[in-house]
Image (spheres, rainbow, N blue to C red):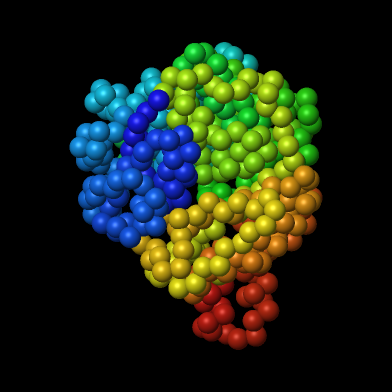
Amino acid sequence: MFKRILIANRGEIALRVIRAAKALGIETVCVYSTADKAGPWIEQADRAVCIGPGPSPESYLRIDRIIAAAEVTHADAIHPGYGFLSENAHFAEVCRDSGFEFIGPSPEAMALLGDKVSCKKLARSVGTPVFPGTENAIDDIEDAVKVAEEIGYPVIVKATAGGGGRGMRVARDAAQLRTGIESARQEAAAAFGNGAVYIEKFLENARHFEVQTIGDKHGNAVHLFERDCSSQRRHQKLVEEAPAPGVDPAKRMKVCESAASLIASAKYSGAATVEFLMDAKQNFYMLEVNTRVQVEHPVTEMITGVDIVREQIMVAAGKPLSFKQADIKVNGHAIECRINAEDPDRGFMPQAGLIESFSAPGGLGVRLDSHARAGYRIPPNYDSMIGKLIVHGPTREIAIARMKVALGEFKIGPLKTTIPLHLKLMANPDFQNATFDIHYVERLLKAQDAARASGSTSKSGSAAGAESRA
Ligand code: MV4
């Protein structure tokens, strides 16, 4: 087993990895930027190394400095967390070539599943359902137009290297497709250094269904069932839950098993999430594979009892998975609300600054994964998530009820947070009845803005009018 792990990340996920490592008797090293010097998670690590200034290109994205920190602290392995370098196959390769175990897949498996065209080909070959579309990246625009006529409009143009919604264009006719391919290529080249794009059938109203999987270096690959992450705004998830409510058990089993087959066929070791869209008839289509631990992994931990970060560390060290597929049973229901320091009434503007008061919720089935506390100053450089509130209960109804209580207890001041929005979502009939799709939060916010604008008797120049347009 490893003696010492370096964590190439910050905030709540750094703390999550420290906790798992400590429970395994493994020492931890944090790397941090000068903006994170006072980060509370750093106190929990055995050692800490400053790797540069606040902007992440000069610190958390600097492979050379992270490797140097691992060398001077004699770390055995590097955990990348999520975001930053976690899905960078070059980083995984540099870790390996420098003698550090990367806690995640091999660079080869990461590259295979990270490229959406090669991932989709593999998925099709093992029977994981995918959208109809071009087999390969588009060479000739007129070939793409032919494929679009075959599968029917609307279609979506996607970057093979993309993810999280960047480099996508919806086309409803051939003219839109031609311009969409051009602009998606340019955007992808600028954003990912790779302008390759492909097309597939576009699905309008769907739910986001994702399967947690994990593989080891002995050829074992299992799934830990699924999460529904339909509550999102601008590709930022707000609420995630497990299991996905109201899904036909036989269909659900098939898609979860197909996700495990996919990562097995990639000879994948570590945690991976296979994302799907589910239509109104509960047909599934794979979107992409995330080759890292995800923000929302705790809801899966709560319903399966598996410590996903512990398993990540164990399999990276060459141990077989500690369980078999047949050992995994779903127990109850879990929901996670992402607590962001953002003002939902002002276009989700990030709220950097001092947390003066912080009163955490608790009680049966309540888990708070957060690096924040009173006296912590949120730096302006990174994402605004300051914690995740996770509740577990025997049923979805009880989990929602416990979440409402926990959100009501949770007081953070004076900064604005997403807590009031979560209280509204928990009381929303579409959430309660699971009659939602990936657009319902945005529709709700739009309706709220419209109601506020029309309810206001003052002119457009008023504070209320300005607020609703922000
Ligand atoms: C789609 C789609 C509809 N049809 N693909 C957005 C992020 C990236 N992971 C894939 N995305 C989508 N791909 C087809 N063929 C709609 C989306 C999409 C979406 C997906 C999941 C969660 C939220 C979303 C919000 C807008 C669009």
Where residue 205 sits: x, y (%)? 68, 43
Kindly tell me whether residue 113 is visible in this rendering.
no
- The spot of residue 98 in percent (x, y) is 24, 26
Q: Quadrant of residue 443?
A: bottom right
Task: Indicate whether 62 appears above or below 213.
Answer: below
Residue 352, quarter of picture:
bottom left
Residue 398 visible somewhere in the drawing:
yes
Q: Is residue 80 left or right of residue 49?
A: right
Check the picture and name the quadrant holding the N terminus: top left
Residue 63 drawn above or below residue 148: below
Q: In the image shown, does 63 or 121 lie closer to the viewer?
A: 63
| Figure label count | 0
Provide residue 50's location: percent of width, then percent of height: 24, 50
Left or right for 399, reference 414: right
- Which residue is pictured at 65% across the width and 85% down the height? 457
Q: Position of residue 120 (x, y in %)?
A: 52, 22
* Quarter of the displayed picture in which ligand 1 can be seen: top right
Q: Residue at x 56, y 49 (%)?
A: 237
Q: Is residue 239 above or below residue 85?
A: below
Q: Is residue 4 above or below residue 440?
A: above
User: Which residue is at the front of the view, 409 or 285?
Assistant: 409
Identify the residue at horizontal 45%, vertical 73% (top origin).
Answer: 356
The front one of 467 and 142 is 467
Residue at image position (44%, 40%) is 22
402 sits left or right of 6 in the view: right
Which residue reaches farthest bottom?
458
